Image (cartoon, grey):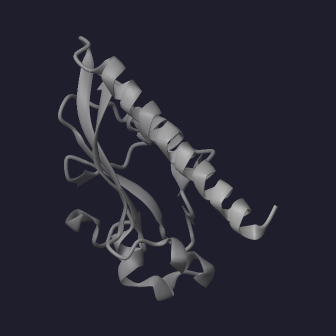
């Protein structure tokens, strides 16, 4: 088999995987839609501070993974069960979209995709906001209600600038 056929087959396989993930996520939304006890929540994953200062990355090989506009995952509507935690929702969204996610032993988020705690020096890492306010409790302890807006943001120093996402 020549290189062109191999590349073509790899590309077709990648497109098939993307379609499968998209259909899987859509199916979960359809299954949950309209069920009593559900909550429509809106989620996005951002890394604005890193996109504005990529030189801060301790591993410059990561620069290629940082979106120029800082939007790692655009705002999407997710139909959760009333009372699901922010962590449960992140886990489901990451699983449905083939995004790697790691939790620390103390219950906070260490990594989403290619960005992990410390990748931009001490104090850098993932934080989350619900309805525009940064939350300090563990994501497993933060329960959602209908209409909540959840933003996961990679910050360079734990607080600075995230209120603008």
**Residue 96 higher or lower than 48, as above or below:** above
Furthest-bottom residue in this view:
55
Q: Position of residue 104 (x, y in %)?
A: 60, 48
Q: Position of residue 117 (x, y in %)?
A: 55, 64
Q: Position of residue 152 (x, y in %)?
A: 37, 54
Whether residue 120 is visible to the viewer of this picture, yes or no, is: no
Quarter of the picture holding the C terminus: bottom left
Furthest-top residue in this view:
36
In-image side of 99 versus 128 (left or right): right
Query: Is residue 154 or residue 18 the one in the foreground?
Result: 18
Quarter of the picture holding the N terminus: bottom right
**Residue 100 higher or lower than 162, as above or below:** above
**Residue 160 higher or lower than 71, as above or below:** below
In-image side of 75 versus 56 (left or right): left
Q: Residue at x 53, y 77 (%)?
A: 64
Q: Quadrant of residue 47?
A: bottom left
Q: Residue at x 39, y 43 (%)?
A: 137
Q: Residue at x 75, y 69 (%)?
A: 3
Q: Position of residue 80 (x, y in %)?
A: 33, 27
Q: Residue at x 29, y 31 (%)?
A: 144
Q: How many marks?
A: 0
Query: Is residue 50 or residue 2 the one in the foreground?
Result: 2
Whether residue 112 is visible to the viewer of this picture, yes or no, is: yes
Query: Is residue 133 or residue 88 the one in the foreground?
Result: 88
């Amino acid at each position: 088999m020549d290189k062109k056929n191999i590349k073509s087959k790899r590309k077709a396989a990648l497109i098939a995987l993307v379609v499968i993930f998209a259909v899987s996520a859509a199916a979960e939304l359809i299954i949950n839609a309209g069920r009593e006890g559900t909550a429509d929540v809106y989620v996005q994953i951002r890394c604005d501070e890193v996109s504005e200062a990529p030189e801060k990355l301790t591993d410059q090989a990561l620069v290629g993974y940082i979106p120029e506009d800082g939007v790692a995952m655009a705002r999407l509507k997710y139909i959760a069960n009333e009372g699901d935690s922010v962590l449960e929702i992140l886990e489901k969204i990451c699983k449905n979209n083939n995004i790697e996610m790691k939790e620390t032993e103390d219950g906070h988020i260490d990594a989403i995709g290619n960005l992990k705690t410390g990748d931009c020096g001490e104090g850098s890492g993932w934080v989350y906001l619900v309805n525009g306010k940064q939350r300090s409790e563990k994501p497993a302890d933060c329960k959602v209600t209908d209409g909540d807006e959840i933003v996961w943001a990679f910050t360079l120093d734990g607080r600075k600038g995230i209120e603008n996402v």
